[in-house]
Image (tube, rainbow, N blue to C red):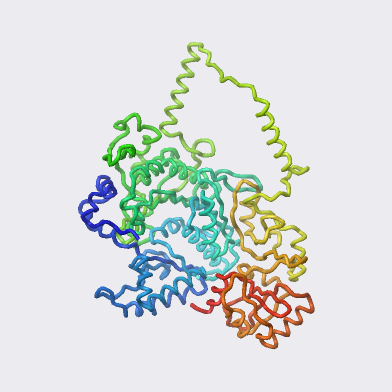
Amino acid sequence: MPSAPSSDALDALPFIQYYVRQGVFRAEELDAVKATLQAPLPVCFRINPNARAGQAIKDRLVNEFPALFASIVRGGKQLSPPAELAWYPFAKSAWQLDCGRSDFAKLGREHPEVQAFRDFLMHQTAEGNITRQEAVSMIPALLLGIQREHRVLDLCAAPGSKTSQVMEELDMKAAAEAAGKPSDSGSHDSSAGGGFIVANDANEKRSYLLVHQLQRLGLDNAVVTCHLGQDFPGLYDNGALRETNVFDRVICDVPCSGDGTIRKNKNLWRQWALGSPLTLYKVQLELALRAAALLKSGGLMVYSTCSLNPIENESVVAELLRRASGALEVVDASELLPGLVRREGLRSWQVAYQSRDVKHSDMSWFSDYESVPDNLRGDRIPKSMFPPGLATTESTALRHCMRLFPTDQNTGGFFVALLRKLGDLPGERQSGLPSFEDAARQAKKAAKKALAAESDEVIPKTRRWPISAKAKRRIEDAALKAAELQSADGESSSLPLLHQYIKLSNDHWSHIRDFYGIKDHFPHEHLFARSDGAISVCLVNPNVQDACLAGRDLKILNTGIRVFARVQAGDRLIFRPAEEGLSLVLPFITKRTIGASESDVARILSAPLSANGQAHPLESFSDEFQAQIQQMRELSGTGPVVLVPTAADSRIQALPVWIGDKSVVLLADKLAQKRLANSQVV
């Protein structure tokens, strides 16, 4: 693993020189900055407020682990135990361990006590009770004041820690209201709250990793989509797509140069490049403008980066405000999250440029747009990169932006601006005012047109070349192919479409209902699959169904909770219960259930982990259990069964199993088997 340069060598690095010149690294604190940035980034995690084991986890963090860490001496000092993040709004819910990730792993190898703590964290993470997340990354979602009914967009969501925060918050608020009391209310049906989050990312591979990250929480109140953020289509309202004013809250955590993460990415010390912020600026601004357009009037959005650079931070916010033309304001969040040390946003900065064509060239610094050479003006260095005049409302508003500085509370570097939408932005689809450069081009074009009109000059029309026979055939073939994809009544054909969900067919629902004796009031109208031949059947939140599945504009990668999985057993079509959604359908099932004693459940879970489940001989179970299986086989044959523990204190609600002629198999993948086997552990 690369290491940070020595302290003496740091001063010569462009990274240090740039931020000293910008005034981000002040002279009087430069030594402390260098020391902090060379130190590993602390390990942080937060507790899911809806976790059933939440209080037990907090008790162990407060009462057990401090003594365990105190017994370890390293470098002549006691090892510091996990410390609570005092500014986190929920008591004993966010923690920081003042050692880096690699040091934490090394300590685990050296000390069994630390390894026990690491195992504890990994187990609780797999259970969905804990999420590893950098401290400053927790801030954007906390500033939004999420309520149970809010529709939230995380525009650039991967890897998903902020999305999971919002999911937990929606669950907590809906549960509290349903129970008629605040906070710790446990699990519930979040669809009653009306709120959900759309987690979007432009990269499909990252989006599927996002799905994997969020599935441990269940995707009941979440939708994972894959769009370029600046082209995100919107949501449906009564079947019609609305392209603006559709979300109550938006997280716009944009792609950035990421130099605020230098404590965990040591390569940045030497790979840091001046050109990255200049290249990213346009995309960051486009994302922020689209986020603002999608936000409802009166709603809140956060613009954030893990960069220290004012070009990616205050510069983007200032231009966003200008182009919003009074439709946005920066909210003063200084009273929110008491105990959090933050710095005001910058109001002055310079723009620097370094040629990539000349090796080891010096940085060129520009204090205003007029000093920029003509060959760099416009697309490379737009006018909006420079700070607005100190007397402007945009400049005054920048003071309310928040800079989280590594030396202040031993964190990474981070930038956050909380914005409120006051009304519609100008332009088509609320795209905002044109950029300075576009406005200049439009003015020049209008002046030329006016001049031509005054002089009666005829502006030549663009010549329309005749279409070739080959081009005509291509157009006709495309039209024919499009027509083939339409059914006679104008609806889409039965051909499966990637990234779409369709309602479960009546035939398949009837098969499931009759096989399991599912009660009539089960909400089967919310069962969806990718196609009639798809393996997974998901129960989708009705609010998500109405807003996201009413058309084909959204490219949906995943939503809902998998409740059944299709299995082809010879010539039999069978839908087995899925472990992750079994608790949702269990209250409605009247057939294919078997009670199991504590010893029988332990037998099922004690098998060696395997990819396809481990077969247990029937004779290894209790006589009562064997009798139930025999009766089930005689009544409705072999196949999937729901095993329900009879012990009142069982932490497991139910298990999906397959009963054969001579054996029983747990229907769960390897990770689920491990999680279920450890489910009695807190």
Tell whether 682 sits left or right of 136: right
The answer to which image quadrant residue 371 occupies is top left
- Considering only vertical position in the picture, is 358 above or below 604? above
Q: Residue furthest bottom?
A: 623
Residue 275: give x, y in percent of width and height. Answer: 36, 42
- Residue 668 appears left or right of 253: right
Q: Nearer the viewer, residue 616 or 63?
A: 616
Q: In this orientation, does residue 50 appear?
A: no
Q: Position of residue 9 (x, y in %)?
A: 23, 53
| Image coords of residue 119 (percent x, y) | 44, 74
Q: Relative to 356, is 572 above or below?
A: below
Number of numbered discs on residues: 0
> Camera-side residue: 129 or 628?
628
Please state which of residues 391 and 519 is positioned toward the viewer in this rendering.
519
Give residue 512's quadrant in the image: bottom right
Which residue is at a point 50% across and 53% down the rendered structure image? 154
Indicate the position of residue 435 as horizontal and vertical percent values.
43, 34
- Quarter the N terminus occupies: bottom left
Residue 260 appears in the rendering: yes
Q: Quadrant of residue 469?
A: top right
- Residue placed most toward the observer, 435 or 505: 505
Vertical relation: 333 (above or below) 217: above
Taking 237 as reference, is 127 left or right? left
